[in-house]
Image (spheres, rainbow, N blue to C red):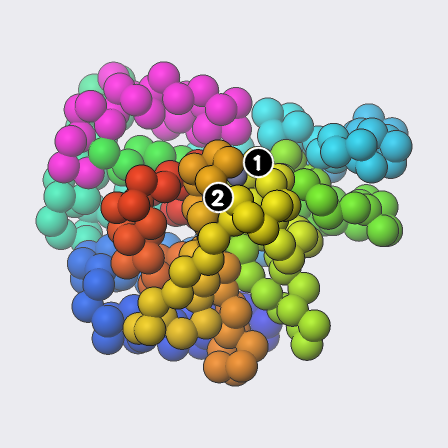
Amino acid sequence: MHSDDQVFVRLMEGKLASIRATDMLPEELVALVEQVLPVQIEARNAAHVTLPDRASCASDEAMFAGSPLIMRENFPHDLDQALRLFPILLEILAGTGGAAAQAADTLRAAIAAGELDPAQALRALPAGDDTLFAVWRQRLPESPRALSFLAASALWPGLNAAALALAKHLPENLPHDRGHCPLCGSLPYITFLREKEGLRFGACSFCGHEHRVRRICCPYCDEGDTAKLKLFRVAEYPGVVVGVCETCSMYVKTLDYRELDKTVLPSLDDMATVALDVLAQGQGYKRPTLSAWGF
Ligand SMILES: [Zn+2]
Ligand SMILES: [Zn+2]
């Protein structure tokens, strides 16, 4: 494992310990993520992605007008690796216990019987085709996101390796007045503040790229009128602000751990603050993206 990855794993362990201390999430879920994340980080280093020529991507001019570098359905990833990871992740899921383990057993049986082809799920996710996932949400009511979790987690290493490599093609001074990811056009699942001056970034729900967004705006509909944007905080979650938008009725969590001297790890911080999702959704606001885990 690279030394950066060791730092990452230590950070992950600290975050997971604090998630466990809050007792907000079932232990099966925490244990699942604890096993999956190191697998993904290793796989990201090993991913083989074929990057398109710069000329076949969006031009700088198109990007300044808001186009992403590559559309999500064409975004490079490592399908072969995802196919190899799928059964490994299924095995981890099967070992977690509870409803998720039962769902894993059902999925394994369906694959063995030829009723479910993992390759089909791995192709459907980048294509934005929900048909197959909808079928399995119905068939697994106790653990409806099991298949999207497996597909998203298996594809993530290749997608994120591609995102890291493609970020060099982003023009300097690209405006950040839109909330979507400049690499793939997807929406962020969480935003956070970084650096002394509090630059705001979004974590892309598809490729994981961390991109600048305006400090005061709704990253989903780009509303910037402060009369339409409201913020709320909860004492138990210092450093987290929930922004709700009256224009599109969406909400987004923003992490500001600078004064608490904590490092952001978006996919885990999102999980750790799920109580705030419950609050925002209880007030009728919606979240347009799944977590980085596909659930
Ligand atoms: Zn993206
Ligand atoms: Zn909005």
Of marks 1 and 2, the one in the foreground: 2
Does the closest atom of ligand 2 sit within 8 Å of the Cβ of label 1?
Answer: yes
Circle 2 sits in a helix, a strand or a loop, which is it? strand
Residue 224 is situated, as x and y percent measured from the top left of the image, at 63, 45
Looking at the picture, does residue 129 appear above or below residue 185? above
Q: Which residue is mark 1?
A: 221
Labelled pair 1, 2 in contact (Cβ < 8 Å): yes
Residue 14 is situated, as x and y percent measured from the top left of the image, at 38, 77
Q: Amino acid at mark 1?
A: Cys
Magenta region, residue range: 115-143
Alpha carbon distance from label 1 to label 2: 9 Å
Instruction: Classify residue 124 by image quadrant.
Output: top left
Given residues 216 and 188, the one toward you in this image is 216
Residue 53 is situated, as x and y percent measured from the top left of the image, at 83, 32
Left or right of residue 253: residue 198:
right
Q: Which residue is mark 2?
A: 245
Does the closest atom of ligand 2 sit within 8 Å of the Cβ of label 2?
Answer: yes
Magenta-colored stretch includes residue 139? yes
Please, what is the dominant secondary structure of the magenta stretch?
helix
Q: Amino acid at mark 2?
A: Cys
Magenta-colored stretch includes residue 119? yes
Q: Quadrant of the C terminus?
A: top left
Given residues 75 and 211, the one toward you in this image is 211
Q: Is residue 105 visible?
A: no
Left or right of residue 97: residue 164:
right
